[in-house]
Amino acid sequence: MSTDKNRATAAAILPLVGGPDNITSIAHCMTRLRISLRDRSLVQDEALRALPAVLGVVEDDTYQIVLGPGAVARVTPEFEALVEEARAAAPAAPHATAPTPAGAITADDLAAHGAALKEAQKARNATPFKLFLRRIANIFVPLIPALIGCGIIAGLNGLLTNLGWVPAVVPALAAIASGFMSLIAVFVGYNTAKEFGGTPILGGAVAAIIVFPGVAKIDAFGLELKPGQGGVLGALAAAVLAVYVEKWCRRWVPETLDVLVTPTLTVLISGLVTLFGLMYLAGEASAAIGTFADRLLAYGGAFAGLILGGLFLPLVMLGLHQALIPIHTTLIEHDGYTVLLPILAMAGAGQVGAAIAVYYRLPHNGSLRATIKSALPAGFLGVGEPLIYGVSLPLGRPFVTACVGGAAGGAFVGLFGQLGMSFGSTAIGPSGWALFPLLDGRAGAGITLAIYAGGLLVGYLVGFTATYFFGLSRAQLAALDRSEDEPPATPVDQPGQPPVLTH
């Protein structure tokens, strides 16, 4: 039955994105189905947003359909299968979007305005540095499901150890939880080579040197090497080097010798540089990141939490939040958990509080209230895109007041870190309420969970209060707080232009 539901969702999405012939690539991350399109004009945005399973759409380097955690991993294979089955079929005809009624500004108007803002951001965001950060994110996103699963098992193992229950099971759980993390460098190397245009298996082979136990026997100019030294940063650097060595070999090695010489030189040259340079440098960088994060919370916890919690929503808006994944992963390797993620998760709490305030400030706008009501469950679980692009960002001020809520929640969590009760997440990916099973800290499970819950509550309350009193101008209230069949209070915007919603 569940498979039928996922296939039905995929079947509903396919014609609305222009059919199978309009799709050039398919992928997914934690919450989004990501597709590349031949002709953007064939996409029926409004009809797509209206699907019950679709939480929102985001346009960036790919067209991204937000389905939520869990659902996207089940719908994507069905979508891929449908595309393959229907390649020979003609693409669906583009569908004309119905005009906006000359009444209240509806959720569809906000969504269209949000899409326009996103398109403008995309044009400003295509800098070489930001594109490079996205490539780094693409390396780590496929690893998130394993990080989550192993992180939860590690937490369960720690709980059983502390309680003294089922001692025979503890070693087995420890092996299951630690196996992936002990070899994560290999997966990072594989994905890095794939992302940068090299042979993936060669990237994995070079990165595997980092975790090989025998490196402890190597004298690297008098510097002691340890298995795993440098971690994911070393693996990433080693694999990037391997890609450039491989490309150099492809240009100069004769074709008749390529199959023998190129892989050998790639692994040999990159491996030697990794052993006698990159491992040490990456190890120092990893240690510096861990030390910096610890001192950041120990000496500036509340202020640091204020800044991090307040600035995270703009990173999500720009799609750059996934560039933090290497830092999170390094902290997990260094300390067993990342202290940054619970603070950054407060941004989602501010967003939820802001959305609830908009809901109560606009009692007559049934369309927008329905959008908020449908997106809030995902928001509580840390999926903020539907609320960002469908509500707060196109309205303008609520996006700012949501950041205020996130800053307040971040300051609350950071303060306890400054008081010596720091904690973090043993894995990355989830946020909001979904982060509870992954929390670990110095003060024990009960206090850790209470601090995180308190931070969420602060984010909700401050985001709600700031938005309720300062998030909507009088002009916005006049334009928005009316039913769809009421006449507009001001002249309707010119056709083809997004509604003027920010003030």
Image (tube, helix red, strand yellow):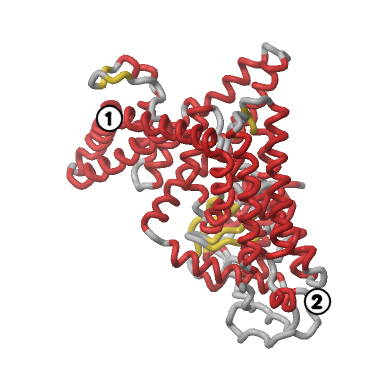
Q: Quadrant of the C terminus?
A: bottom right
Image coordinates for residue 252, horizontal then vertical, percent: 17, 44
- First in sequence: mark 2 vs mark 1: 1
The local secondary structure at tag 1 comes to helix
Image coordinates for residue 332, horizontal then vertical, percent: 52, 31
Q: Is residue 74 visible?
A: no
Residue type, numbered disc 1? Gly
- Give 88 or 252, whichever is nearer the viewer: 252
- Most extreme residue toward the top, as rendered? 168
The residue under the point 44% across, 35% down is 289
Q: Quadrant of residue 254?
A: top left
- Residue with the mark numbered 2: 483
Q: Quadrant of residue 268?
A: top left
- Relative to 473, say whether 384 is above or below: above
The local secondary structure at tag 2 comes to loop
- Relative to 77, say whether 44 is above or below: below
Q: How many marks?
A: 2
Measured Cα–Cα span from mark 2 to mark 1? 66 Å
Contact, mark 2 vs mark 1 (Cβ under 8 Å): no
The residue under the point 39% across, 25% down is 229
Q: Residues within 10 Å of mark 1 (few under 14, many from 20)?
A: some
- Give 333 or 91, whichever is nearer the viewer: 333
Residue type, numbered disc 2? Ser
Image coordinates for residue 132, horizontal then vertical, percent: 39, 52
- Give 40 or 410, whichever is nearer the viewer: 410
- Residue with the mark numbered 1: 277
In the image: residue 122, left or right of residue 401: left
Q: Residues within 10 Å of mark 2 (few under 14, many from 20)?
A: some
In the image: residue 258, left or right of residue 306: left
